[in-house]
Every structure is written in structure tokens, then in C-alpha cells.
């Protein structure tokens, strides 16, 4: 190392002091043993080099760390070679836009990864070992990918996650963090993991056990309930939604007396989803006292008398006494009572009417919005298809009207309670009447790939929008959904839309070419999705060749004849 004559003083070996000097800069702080000037940076580097040698020379060799256990085997079949190459492309794609913010005609491969993973998992394939790092990185960046990605990645991904802190989310997102994949089948290991595991591990374990043995999961939670923190009790209680049944009622009734208001509210919500529970009965009595039919008028009408107070019994059953800002207390209490009451009680209370007849009744004094919104929440919570149909009304009804007068967000939730085919028919009817501008939320609840009625309605509506001469950017959200959700068989119907149309006089300049580009990307994506599914299909075993003429097929030896 070079030293100048004016730096004969011993250089400091305090590493922290050298780091501080480097951060501040030698113009603001001169290294010890040096003088301000052009040589100060060199002297600092010399001191750092010398200190590094001293530090390393003074280290004592540590014991060698235990080698990690080998990665577990994955018994699932390997991906077909074409599908393995496709996976690499999907994981390395970096979507971009062309000039002017235009997407161009190239498909967005990362948006196809969720469907690819779902198909690969349906076939039961194992992930290629070399793809696991990129797969874990993709799952870390997108939480919507995690369940399917981790299922596909299998046990080797958990092995890697224990070695890389960036992938620790995989340990939290799987049953027991991978500490024991068979823990739900082993009572002793289950109990030990429940008592000693990290919070995320315990949540995952409880969720896994609940899906397989609801009573055992409830007993495990009850054993430590009194000693859990309030925020932990809330998360644990939420896991009881899976497999919720009458056997859970005693435990949930005890949770109504919990110290935490959020825990009490969650327990009350779960109990109200059980129509025969004692809480549902109590809520039915309270709600029925507030709603009745006035038969003295020329036309029967629902009249509402909202609660005048929120008593202790109501609070114990989950009614939140303090209304949010901008809400009246009485309407706030009424909504909670009606939402928690079993929907079956209203036919008895309102003259034996069906849900459609009840929803069609006028409501006095401006209470219709509050009452119907509460019935919507009850229908979603109780998964009641009959009430959902009544509140949805006909898809051709005015967007802001209809029997239930519900919003699009509420309609989307109500549609989720209906069978997939009925849901598709309703959404298709809505699009045919109202177009695509208001249909985005509704399309999100349709099963993928979209059923034929939905696909036809979307393509026809896009065609109408193109002919109107507007830019396609107003429909970019729907177009993106179509790329992921439209049945690949619809690609043939779109070929006629790839040409640049003649633009009407009042059309936006260049709109036709933009539409042609958007449809080209849609068709390309649909055909790529079809190719992805073909690549993932298991290879067909070769058919046996027919025996040459005159040959005799060998037969198994049978018993000798006498």
C-alpha cells in the first residue's frame, strides 16, 4: 500500500469510523492520519483495505454449518416438453407498450399465467426444478398467483423457501408452512404445531384442518381460545366460514361475549348465516317488529318503523351502536337487523308473499333503498338464490331501477349466488340491453371461459362500439377481460373484425385502425390460449398396429382339454 510522507500517523482500524467518513465524504471529514487535499480519498481507501485485512486475519474459523437436507422428491409426472418451454416464456415475459401508449398486437403472456397454472394443476403435473426460482418470484409479486403457483411448485418450492428469505411467503401460505405436510393427519404433530408454531403457520394449519375435519379444527381453537390475542382470535374465527354448520353454534354463541367488538361482530355474522341459529331467531323477531304491510291503503305497501335505540341485547348480537359519519342511527340499526334476519321469515311476516312479490311492493317514506340494500346483503350472506333473483330483477330493467333498485356492485354480489349458467344468461341479457359501459363488474363474476351467451354478447357489443366510430380505449378493461375469459373457440367469429373498417364522417380519427389492432391482439391471444391447452394435454398413447394378414395373435395358455 502506498503511504505519503505526511500520513505517518497510524491509520484507524475502527470500521465504523471509516464507514462514517466514507458516507460524509473526505471534503467534510478528513480521515484520521491524513490531511485535507486530493490525497485524502486515497488515504481513506488505503485505511479501509488495511482494516479489512486486519478484520479477516482476526477471525476465528467457525464450525461448518450443517448441510441442508436434500430437496424432497416430487412424484407427479413431468410437464410435456412443449409446455415446459411455454412456462419459461410465460415467466420471463415483460409486457410493454408500443409508441403512444398503444399495446400493439402481441398478447400479454403474464396475464395468461394464471390459466396456464390452473390447467397444469388440473393435469397434476410437477414443476420443472429449473423453473422454481422464477415461479416463486412471480408468486411473490402477485398474490393472486400464489395458491395455484405454490400448488404447482410442490414440496421443492417449500424447500427453497426455507433457504431464501425473499420466498418465506411460501411457508406462510401453505399448510403449516411446510413444517409438516401431514400434520392434519397426525394429532400429536398437529397439537404441537398449533401450540408452538408461528401465527401464520397456525392460521394455515387451522384452515387446512377445517376443510377436512371441521369439528377437530373447532376443538383445537376452543382449547386455546381464552389465551389468544384479540387480533389472533379474529383471524382464527374467520377460518370457521369453511364448513360452517349447526355444530359451530355453541362455540360462536360464546364468542358473542368476547372482549373484542370485532370478534363479536364476526361471530354474529357467522351465526346469522345459520338460519336456524338462536341469534337468527332473535334477529328475526327484532326485524319483523320494524317491517310490516299496510293493508289499509288502496295498494298494499311496506311500512318501516326503525329501532329507536340499540339496547344491550342488540349489541351482544353484533349490532354496532355507533353509526358511520353521514348515516342516521335508526337506519343504521335497521339495516343491521334486516341483514342478519333469516330471509325465510319475511314470507310469514308479509302475508305469505314470495320474494318477488315482496320486493315488488312499494315501500313508504323513502325506506326502500335501505330495506332492499339490507335484503341484498342478507341474500349474499345466506346464499339465497330465490331472493337474489327477486332483487336482481330482469336484466333488461333500467340500470338504476328494477324491482330491487340495487347498484351494479350489489348485482355482481347477488349474481355470485346463482348457478353459472343462469348467471351467464343474466349478464348476456344485461349487455344486450345496456351495452358494455356498465358491464365490467358483472363480467367479473362469470365463470371462465365465458359461456356462449356471454361471449356472443361481448363480441356483438364490441362490434357495435367499433361501428359507432369511438376509440377502443374506453373498452380496454372489457377487452382485457375478453382476452383472458372469452372461449378460444370464438376466435373464428372475430376474423371478420380484423380488417380496418371504413370510418363514418363523425368517427374519431384513426379509430378504425386502433380497433383492428385491438381485435388482432384478441384473436392472437385466443389462439395462443388454445395452443397452451393443447401443449398441456397428456400425450396420447400410440395405437396398436393391426396384425399382418394371416398372422395369429398369441393367446394366454388355457386349461388343457381332455
Image (cartoon, grey):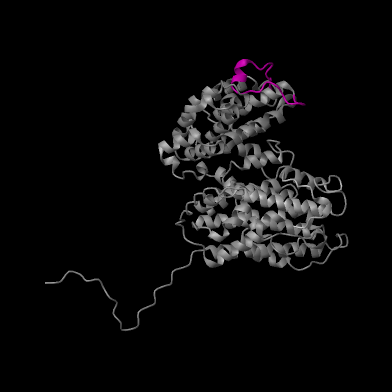
Q: Residue at x 61, y 36 (%)?
A: 380
* Quarter of the image where the N terminus is located: bottom right
Number of marks = 0
User: Which residue is more in the foreground, 313 or 392?
Assistant: 313
Q: Which residues are magenta?
A: 303-327
> Is 436 placed left or right of 67 in the picture?
right
| Residue 530 drawn above or below residue 351 | below
- Residue drawn at x 73%, y 38% is 401
Instruction: Name the residue at the bottom extreme.
Output: 550
Q: Nearer the viewer, residue 386 or 296?
A: 386
Decide: is 471 above or below 201.
below
Q: Residue at x 55, y 45 (%)?
A: 171
For this view, does 435 lie left or right of residue 560? right
Where residue 404 appears, x then y in whole percent? 68, 35
Relative to 305, residue 205 above or below: below
Q: Nearer the viewer, residue 274 or 176?
A: 176
Name the magenta segment's main secondary structure. Answer: loop
Amino acid at each position: 500500500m502506498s503511504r505519503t510522507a505526511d500520513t505517518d500517523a497510524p491509520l484507524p482500524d475502527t470500521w465504523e469510523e471509516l464507514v462514517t467518513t466514507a458516507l460524509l465524504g473526505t471534503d467534510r471529514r478528513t480521515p484520521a492520519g491524513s490531511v485535507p487535499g486530493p490525497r485524502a480519498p486515497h488515504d481513506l481507501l488505503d485505511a479501509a483495505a488495511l482494516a479489512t485485512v486486519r478484520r479477516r486475519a482476526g477471525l476465528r474459523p467457525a464450525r461448518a454449518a450443517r448441510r441442508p437436507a436434500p430437496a424432497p422428491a416430487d412424484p407427479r409426472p413431468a410437464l410435456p416438453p412443449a409446455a415446459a418451454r411455454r412456462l419459461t416464456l410465460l415467466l420471463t415475459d415483460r409486457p410493454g407498450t408500443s409508441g403512444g401508449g398503444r399495446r400493439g398486437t402481441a398478447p400479454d403472456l403474464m396475464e395468461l399465467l394464471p390459466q396456464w397454472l390452473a390447467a397444469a394443476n388440473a393435469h397434476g403435473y410437477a414443476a420443472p426444478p429449473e423453473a422454481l426460482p422464477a415461479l416463486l418470484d412471480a408468486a411473490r409479486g402477485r398474490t393472486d398467483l400464489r395458491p395455484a403457483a405454490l400448488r404447482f411448485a410442490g414440496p421443492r418450492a417449500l424447500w427453497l423457501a426455507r433457504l431464501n428469505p425473499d420466498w418465506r411467503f411460501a411457508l406462510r401460505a401453505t399448510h403449516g408452512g411446510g413444517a409438516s405436510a401431514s400434520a392434519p393427519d397426525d394429532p400429536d404433530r398437529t397439537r404441537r404445531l398449533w401450540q408452538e408454531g408461528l401465527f401464520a403457520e397456525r392460521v394455515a394449519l387451522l384452515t387446512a384442518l377445517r376443510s377436512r375435519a371441521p369439528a377437530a379444527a373447532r376443538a383445537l381453537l376452543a382449547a386455546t381460545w381464552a389465551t389468544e390475542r384479540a387480533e389472533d382470535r379474529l383471524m382464527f374465527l374467520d377460518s370457521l366460514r369453511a364448513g360452517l354448520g349447526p355444530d359451530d353454534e355453541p362455540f360462536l354463541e360464546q364468542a358473542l361475549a368476547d372482549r373484542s367488538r370485532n370478534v363479536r361482530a364476526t361471530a354474529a355474522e357467522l351465526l346469522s348465516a345459520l338460519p336456524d341459529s338462536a341469534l337468527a331467531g332473535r334477529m328475526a323477531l327484532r326485524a319483523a317488529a320494524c317491517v310490516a304491510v299496510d293493508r289499509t291503503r288502496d295498494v298494499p305497501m311496506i311500512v318501516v318503523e326503525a329501532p329507536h335505540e340499540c339496547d344491550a341485547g342488540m349489541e351482544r348480537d353484533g349490532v354496532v351502536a355507533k353509526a358511520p359519519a353521514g348515516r342516521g342511527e335508526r337506519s343504521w340499526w335497521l339495516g343491521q337487523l334486516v341483514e342478519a334476519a333469516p330471509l325465510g321469515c319475511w314470507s310469514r311476516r308479509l302475508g305469505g308473499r314470495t320474494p318477488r312479490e315482496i320486493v315488488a311492493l312499494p315501500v313508504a317514506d323513502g325506506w326502500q333503498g335501505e330495506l332492499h340494500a339490507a335484503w341484498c346483503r342478507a341474500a349474499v350472506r345466506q346464499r339465497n338464490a330465490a331472493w337474489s333473483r327477486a332483487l336482481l330483477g330482469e336484466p333488461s330493467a333500467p340500470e338504476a331501477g328494477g324491482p330491487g333498485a340495487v347498484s351494479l356492485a350489489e348485482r355482481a354480489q347477488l349474481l355470485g349466488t346463482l348457478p353459472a349458467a343462469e348467471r351467464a344468461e343474466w349478464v348476456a341479457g344485461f349487455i344486450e340491453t345496456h351495452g358494455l359501459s356498465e358491464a365490467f363488474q358483472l363480467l367479473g363474476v362469470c365463470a371462465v371461459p365465458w359461456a356462449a351467451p356471454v361471449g356472443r354478447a361481448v363480441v356483438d357489443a364490441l362490434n357495435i362500439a367499433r361501428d359507432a366510430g369511438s376509440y377502443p380505449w374506453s373498452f380496454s378493461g372489457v377487452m382485457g377481460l375478453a382476452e383472458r375469459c372469452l372461449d378460444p373457440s370464438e376466435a373464428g367469429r372475430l376474423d371478420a373484425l380484423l380488417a380496418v373498417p371504413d370510418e363514418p364522417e363523425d368517427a374519431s380519427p384513426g379509430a378504425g385502425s386502433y380497433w383492428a389492432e385491438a381485435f388482432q391482439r384478441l384473436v392472437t391471444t385466443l389462439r395462443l390460449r388454445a395452443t397452451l391447452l393443447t401443449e398441456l394435454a397428456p400425450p396420447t398413447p400410440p395405437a396398436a398396429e393391426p396384425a399382418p394378414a394371416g398372422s395369429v395373435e398369441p393367446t394366454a395358455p388355457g386349461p388343457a382339454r381332455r
